[in-house]
Amino acid sequence: MAKPAVLTHPESLKRPAGPSEYAKDPVNAALSKAEKIALYTKMARIRHFEQRCIRIYQQGKIGGFLHLYVGQEAVAAGTISLLGKNDHLITGYRDHGHGLMVGMGMNECMAELTGRVTGCSQGKGGSMHYFAPDKNYWGGHGIVGGQAPLGTGLAYAVKYMGLKGSCLVYMGDGAVNQGAVHEAYNLASLWDLPVIFVVENNGYSMGTSQERSTAHPGCLAKRAEGYNMAWDVINGHDVYEVRAKTAIALKRAHEESKPTVLEIFTYRYFGHSMADPDKTYRDKEEIKEYREKKDPVLAFEQELLREKVLTPELSQKINEEAMAEADKAAIFADESPDPTVADITKHIYWEEDNRGPKTTSRGTIIFE
Amino acid sequence: MAVISYREALRAAMREELKRDDKVVIMGEEVAQFNGAYKVTEGLLKEFGPKRIVDTPISEAGFIGLGIGASMLGIRPVMELMFWSFSYVAFDQIVNNAGNIRYMSGGLINCPIVIRGPGNGGTNVGATHSHTPEAILASHPGIKVVCPATPYDAKGLLKAAIRDNDPVYVMENTILYNDKGEVPDEDYIVPLGVADVKRVGTDLTIVAHGRAVITSLKAAEILEQEHGVSVEVVDLRSIRPLDEETILASVRKTHRALLVEENKPFCGVDAQVAYLIQSKAFDELDAPIHRVSSIDAPQIYCKRMEDQQLPDVNRVVREALKVLA
Ligand SMILES: Cc1ncc(C[n+]2csc(CCOP(=O)(O)OP(=O)(O)O)c2C)c(N)n1
Ligand SMILES: [Mg+2]
């Protein structure tokens, strides 16, 4: 097999973490002190929520899969912090961070994990299937790459309705090899749709390093050229850089109705899911390196301390509050009731849930 | 005879076939370096090397289609799907291409592909990961489908599948992977299309496949102990080809039938089995046929409710008593 080309990383990724060169970028310079603190708070909340999930999983209260977002916070935080009223988003199964960023509550998110009726999907979706359409968040999708055409369709609908908006479609570095993703790329470009495909490149798809899964011309984003789309690479450890470069793509979507592929380099600290012992395919040293030198939450905290936006005391308070909020959510998830057997057959068809003269079909629809 | 797990039985089948026939190739996501998402292929890369044991990208339509193409030229790919639920991404390949190529070429082309992996609910992973597509796939002539319930059958059916000249889809069950059972040391196959009477009885026939067989055997024990009824459990093992004769012979003996499956009820495997019994053994029946299947809804995430959604021992016992009433 041919050796894959060397990856084109963003320049900033090669330098040791330090003051962000994107701090003065207009979208970041425009942030008020309060907005910066709010952004940091959201990142800290994602971190503490996820860490609380680990404990609940280990207590056996979450079954199935649990894919954590720890290490990748700046991606959801940076991109989603830019979105307006007509901007939508959709992602895969590593979906907690995006949910918290759009404003979902920790309670409903935690209760979904333990399968409670108080969960965001009433205990029907689980970790991989968070939804908050009232907040323009369309999930939470378990099938790798399946969300790409859906997100393209959301962008199509935005354009169709004459709105100035967009859809951000998040996927992993492994997802870029799904046919559905390529078909979505082509449609987005062919029909000038306001989509931003955000490839969250954390280096691995399960136990497969990106080099072993993907033929590419230097980076994954560059595949966009084959579809005549704009692209960029982003250091996902620097939330300012994520914002600065995403803003350009968002402008392209809003002003020109054109798609973009953004590849954001990031890293996950835990196994693919809690079921992955994470012992064979990567070095402990590699994880340590990222945790210690490139942590996105820590880096932003340092940045804001340097800017004198944060004080150590305030930062401590923010983190303690986030932890307390996660603890409370865990109790809420514990004490909430389960759905009932009768609930199993609800939400299958609109007409079953809304019986009345408006139904358009007859006959048996749910079978014994 | 050795006592091994269902997982080990599958692995042994692949090992033996890899040794027997150098055209056999194992392919799928995480099957080689990671030793399999469910460790079914553990150790095979080390033993057979990267030409025979191949990791694929997450491109089910691509690699399954590639396997089907390679099989047309005589390779015998054994493709692993991490879940059968992911086969839906490759539906065109597994149904349209694999299922029709022999027919449309007037018999000129063989398609000896095996696709295997877990196709079950009950693991608390939600609707997109809990499909049981044996009925959907078996409804396409040209395709064979088997659902082993025990280590013995898992090994024997997989070996038969690999030697078969048509597409054979093997649906396993993650909940059964650790189940242990006796498996002969010498080479054997379980021919496709031969059901197995897993328990002999005289008062009621339960027909089941996959994990529903295990549930039914437990129910049969309770029915015997607590209700004094003698239940015969017929394990289909193979959905297509279907062993009509074994089903009918059992019904002719017991005159009552209960059909149990983990599929959803509508157009399930047992809808076909029920039709078979009433069309060929109507006069033998002393009671209407009953079915137990999953509650008719997408798979619910909540574990406690999912356990209710799937057929369980209590539900099988209750329904059996109705047939016997
Ligand atoms: C169609 C399909 N195939 C396989 C899987 C199993 N699976 C879930 S996540 C995953 C790896 C995806 O990796 P990547 O796209 O890099 O995202 P990451 O998990 O790193 O966020 C695999 C193989 C799936 N869910 N859907
Ligand atoms: Mg990845």
Image (spheres, rainbow, N blue to C red):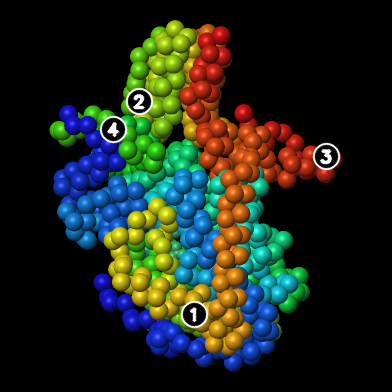
Q: Quadrant of the C terminus of chain A?
A: top right
User: What residue is pinned by disc 1?
Assistant: A299
Ligand 1 sits in which quadrant?
bottom left
Dividing the picture into quarters, in which one does residue A140 lie?
A: bottom right
Please state which amino acid type lies under the numbered disc 2. Ala
- Classify 10 Å Cα crowding around label 2: few (below 14), some (14-19), many (20 and above): many
Q: Position of residue A247 (x, y in %)?
A: 62, 83
Q: Chain of mark 1?
A: A
Mark seen at residue A309:
none
Please state which amino acid type lies under the numbered disc 3. Gly
Can residue A249 be spotted in the picture?
no
Q: Nearer the viewer, residue B35 or A273?
A: A273
User: Left or right: A368 with respect to B169?
Assistant: right
Label 4 to label 2, Cα distance in Å? 20 Å
Mark 3 or mark 1: whose residue is earlier in sequence: 1
- Classify 10 Å Cα crowding around label 4: few (below 14), some (14-19), many (20 and above): some
Mark seen at residue B195:
2
Label 3 to label 4, Cα distance in Å? 53 Å
Q: Chain of mark 2?
A: B
Instruction: Decide: is B109 above or below A201.
Output: above
Label 3 to label 2, Cα distance in Å? 47 Å
Name the residue rendered at 83%, 44% in the picture. Answer: A358
Name the residue rendered at 66%, 34% in the picture. Answer: A342
Q: Chain of mark 3?
A: A
User: What residue is pinned by disc 4?
Assistant: B180
Q: Position of residue A25 (x, y in %)?
A: 60, 90
Please state which amino acid type lies under the numbered disc 1. Ala
Mark 4 or mark 2: whose residue is earlier in sequence: 4
Regarding mark 4 in the picture, which secondary structure is present there? Answer: strand
Instruction: Decide: is A246 above or below A153.
Output: below
